[in-house]
Amino acid sequence: MPTAREALLNAALAALGGLPWSAVRMVDVASAAGVSRQTLYNEFGSKEGLARALVRREADAYLQGVDRLLARPLPPARNLAAVAGWTVAEAAARPLLRALLTGCWNERLPTPRPARAGTRASAVPAQRRADAGVPSPADLLGLARDRAASALGPGDDETLRSCEVVLRLALSYVVAPRPPVSPAEGQWAEPESWSPTTPTITSVIETIFRVDTMSPRKTIP
């Protein structure tokens, strides 16, 4: 059974499915979670605190998914391919994750503003962490890259660059997805090459690992 905090976060996320964040009311979130409004304020402090916690949870869930896929007992290229394909699919289905990965927030989403200077720290440890801020797109990409490099072997510069290339390749598809298969469909179709188990993406990633670049640059812009 979820804790009151998780129930409130779930209720807030569900409310976003039909309303812009500006129209989501704290009293309705508390009611949907089956707790009092005071419990909601005790956990998050304010609606802005709830927004920060919601976005923080989304970032954590993404990194946990990356860890889960990298831990599978499969060849490194296949695991990294799974991370790339999963990133594209999850970003398409989860607007908050898509905004975190791209930095493109809109009026329907709870844009995470930092806690105001001088605000008293929350008594809830999880909320203090959320109030400290959420990762930027570059930070989130870097965290995923470092996890991938650590799981795939020595975290040397070449491994880090290879992992970052793969993740940036995935993000390029998040930013500019394939057009609908037909106008009648009206939805974005995921190309077969992005399926985590297809040989196409695995081949691309294996090629990235084989490339011996002569560039003196140590980071990818």
Image (cartoon, rainbow, N blue to C red):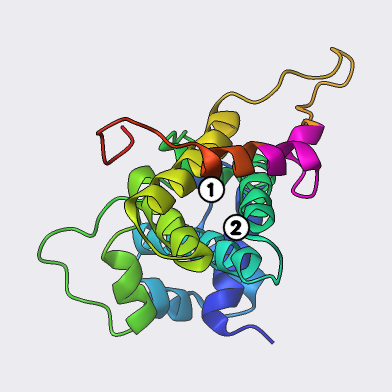
Q: Residue furthest left?
A: 118
Magenta segment includes 19: no
Is 95 rendered above or below residue 61? above
Magenta-colored span: 192-203
Q: Position of residue 168 (x, y in %)?
A: 48, 37
Instruction: Give the quarter of the image for residue 127.
Output: bottom left
Which residue is at 51% across, 56% downward?
Answer: 25
Three-letter code for the amino acid on which mark 1 is drawn = Leu
Which residue is at 56% across, 71% downward?
Answer: 8
Q: Earlier in the sequence, mark 1 or mark 2?
A: 2
Q: Is residue 51 visible?
A: no
Q: Position of residue 102 (x, y in %)?
A: 45, 37
> Would you say 147 lies left or right of 122 here?
right
Q: Nearer the viewer, residue 93 or 88?
A: 88
Q: Secondary structure at mark 2?
A: helix
> Would you say 167 lies left or right of 53 here?
right
Q: Position of residue 123 (x, y in %)?
A: 28, 85
Is 67 rendered above or below residue 4? above
- Residue 185 has which mark? none
Q: Which residue is mark 1?
A: 96
